[in-house]
Image (tube, rainbow, N blue to C red):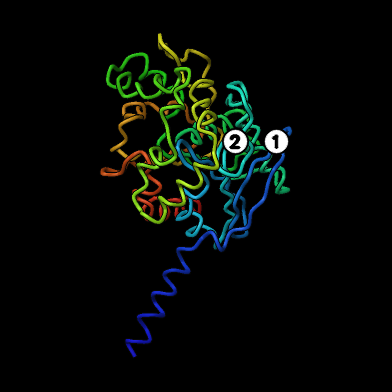
């Protein structure tokens, strides 16, 4: 009997991990820019936004965990994988990235969504929530502090200034010439997943990836954001892998001062910047429990 069971378990394991065979693909038109997305499940809409260097596949574990009750839609941000790659730094300014997310929501016939974002996707998610609260049901952020917290740390914390050297490097003309698809997949631990990432990055535009930094990342001299506080109008769940060497945890302090509704903050020792993969089970289970409150 055990000789029958073991192959069956192996087959089930392969099937469970093969999310690419389960998702359906679509495109939204964002003022002439095609935004690709992968969708899994039915129910309330969750839009998931990746960061750098990444693509929709980063959310595979969370999509599997949540798709029994939700429609999980993971996008390729512009410049990445199967989405369009318009030329020019100005085509990567945050308001346009926000517009891409809104276009996806509308293309799916919905008026609002649960917004999930990591890294640059987190920055976009913050801005969707703050500027379009009527379209943001709930907000989940992974390893991207509130913009005011990040600006405070850049202005005052030498450790964060040092940690952001990579961003200043990316802002230099021609910086994309120093990158290769293989090099920017360095962080992907699973060998089979890394192959997929390298292929996705070959389909992407390396210059476009760095345009996110050129168009949006603060430049020296850093100053605090003194604009009036716009508080969130929806519940917020934040994850932060404490092993993140680019976005330090000090920027999380006082996040609660900018919240208009409840904030749940989950810090995870041992997890790096890519917390949704380093601690995928904890992140997925926490998201499911939090959304089901």
Name the spot of residue 140 as percent of width and height, x first: 48, 42
Q: In which quarter of the image is residue 97?
A: top right
In-front residue for pair 100/127: 100
**Front: mark 1 or 2:** 2
User: In whole angstroms, how far apart are the C-alphas of marks 1 and 2?
Assistant: 10 Å
Q: Name the residue under label 2.
A: 78
Q: Which residue is drawn at 54% across and 45% down?
A: 48
Residue 233: give its label.
none
Q: Residue at x 36, y 30 (%)?
A: 252
Q: Residue at x 43, y 26 (%)?
A: 257
Q: Mark 1 points at which residue?
A: 30
Asked whether residue 30 is in view, the answer is: yes
Name the spot of residue 143 as percent of width and height, x first: 40, 36
Q: In the structure shown, which secondary structural element does the residue marked by tag 1 occupy? A: strand
Callout 2 crowding tier (Cα within 10 Å): few <14, some 14–19, many ≥20 = many
Name the spot of residue 155 as percent of width and height, x first: 37, 14
Callout 1 crowding tier (Cα within 10 Å): few <14, some 14–19, many ≥20 = some
The reply to whether dot 1 and dot 2 touch (C-beta < 8 Å) is yes
Q: In which quarter of the image is residue 83?
A: top right
């Amino acid at each position: 009997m055990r000789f029958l069971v073991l192959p069956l378990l192996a087959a089930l394991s392969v099937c469970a991990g093969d999310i690419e065979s389960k998702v359906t693909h679509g495109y939204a038109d964002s003022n002439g820019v095609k935004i690709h997305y992968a969708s899994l499940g039915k129910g309330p809409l969750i839009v998931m936004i990746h960061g750098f260097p990444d693509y929709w596949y980063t959310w595979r574990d969370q999509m599997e965990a949540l798709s029994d009750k939700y429609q999980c839609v993971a996008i390729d941000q512009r410049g990445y994988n199967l989405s369009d790659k318009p030329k020019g730094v100005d085509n990567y300014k945050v308001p346009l990235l926000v517009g891409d997310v809104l276009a996806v929501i509308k293309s799916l016939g919905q008026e609002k969504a649960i917004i999930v974002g990591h890294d640059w996707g987190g920055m976009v998610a913050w801005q969707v929530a703050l500027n379009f609260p009527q379209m943001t049901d709930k907000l989940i952020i992974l390893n991207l502090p509130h913009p005011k917290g990040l600006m405070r740390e850049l202005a005052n914390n030498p450790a964060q200034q040092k940690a952001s050297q990579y961003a200043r490097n990316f802002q230099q003309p021609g910086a994309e010439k120093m990158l290769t698809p293989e090099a920017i997949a360095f962080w992907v631990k699973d060998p089979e997943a890394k192959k997929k990432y390298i292929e996705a990055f070959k389909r992407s535009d390396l210059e476009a990836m760095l345009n996110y930094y050129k168009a949006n990342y603060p430049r020296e001299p850093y100053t605090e954001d003194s604009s009036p506080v716009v508080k969130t109008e929806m519940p917020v769940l934040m994850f932060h892998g404490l092993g993140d060497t680019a976005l330090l945890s000090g920027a999380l302090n006082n996040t609660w001062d900018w919240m208009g509704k409840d904030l749940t903050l989950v810090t995870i020792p041992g997890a790096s910047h890519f917390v949704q993969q380093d601690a995928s089970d904890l992140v997925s289970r926490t998201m499911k429990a939090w959304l089901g409150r």
